[in-house]
Image (cartoon, rainbow, N blue to C red):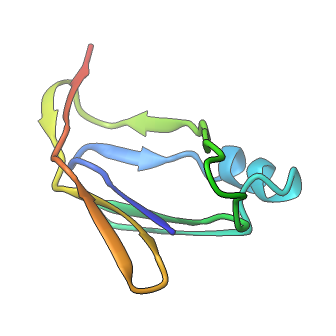
Amino acid sequence: KIVQALPAGVQVDTPSLEALVEQSTITKFEAAEGKLELTMPPLEPGQHYTVKYKVIPTLAGTLRSAASTISMGDTKFSVPPMQWTVR
C-alpha cells in the first residue's frame, strides 16, 4: 500500500486512477483530503513498481505535502515530505 500525501490545492483525477484499476496496475484506491491511498497487487522479490496518475492543481505556487508512506503487512517506510511547484 502506498499513501501519497497531497498538498492543499491538489485534487486527484479519478478517471486516471479508475484506468489503473481496469489495467490491474492497482487493485483499489481511496482519495481523501490531503492524501491518496493506492493498493497494488503483490510483487516478486526485487521487482520495481512504477505507477503514474494525474492530479489537478487548484492553486498555483510552491506547495508542500506531508510525509508519504509505503507499507506491506507490518513493515512501513516513510517518504520525506515533498515540495510541489505549480505554475
Q: Residue furthest top?
A: 87
Considering only vertical position in the picture, is 57 above or below 40? above
Q: In terms of image quadrants, where is residue 36?
A: bottom left
Give x and y (percent) for residue 63.
15, 35
What x and y, as percent, mark residue 7?
22, 47
Towards the viewer: 20 or 12: 20
Image quadrant where one finds the C terminus: top left
Q: Residue at x 76, y 52 (%)?
A: 25
Residue 9 lies, with reference to residue 85, above or below; the image says below
Q: Position of residue 85 (x, y in %)?
A: 22, 21
Q: In the current view of this chain or complex, which residue is farthest to the bottom?
A: 74
Q: Kindly identify the residue that appears in the image at 16 percent across and 46 percent down.
A: 81
Total marks placed: 0
Left or right placement of residue 47 versus residue 32 in this view: right
Residue nearest the observer in this picture, 9 or 79: 79
In the image, is residue 27 above or below residue 50?
below
Q: Residue at x 87, y 56 (%)?
A: 22
Q: Is residue 69 rendered to the left or right of residue 60?
A: right
Q: Residue at x 19, y 38 (%)?
A: 82
| Image side of residue 84 versus residue 39, left or right | left
Decide if residue 49 is on the left or right side of residue 44: left
Residue 76 image offset from top left, x and y in percent: 33, 72
Looking at the image, which residue sits at the far front?
45
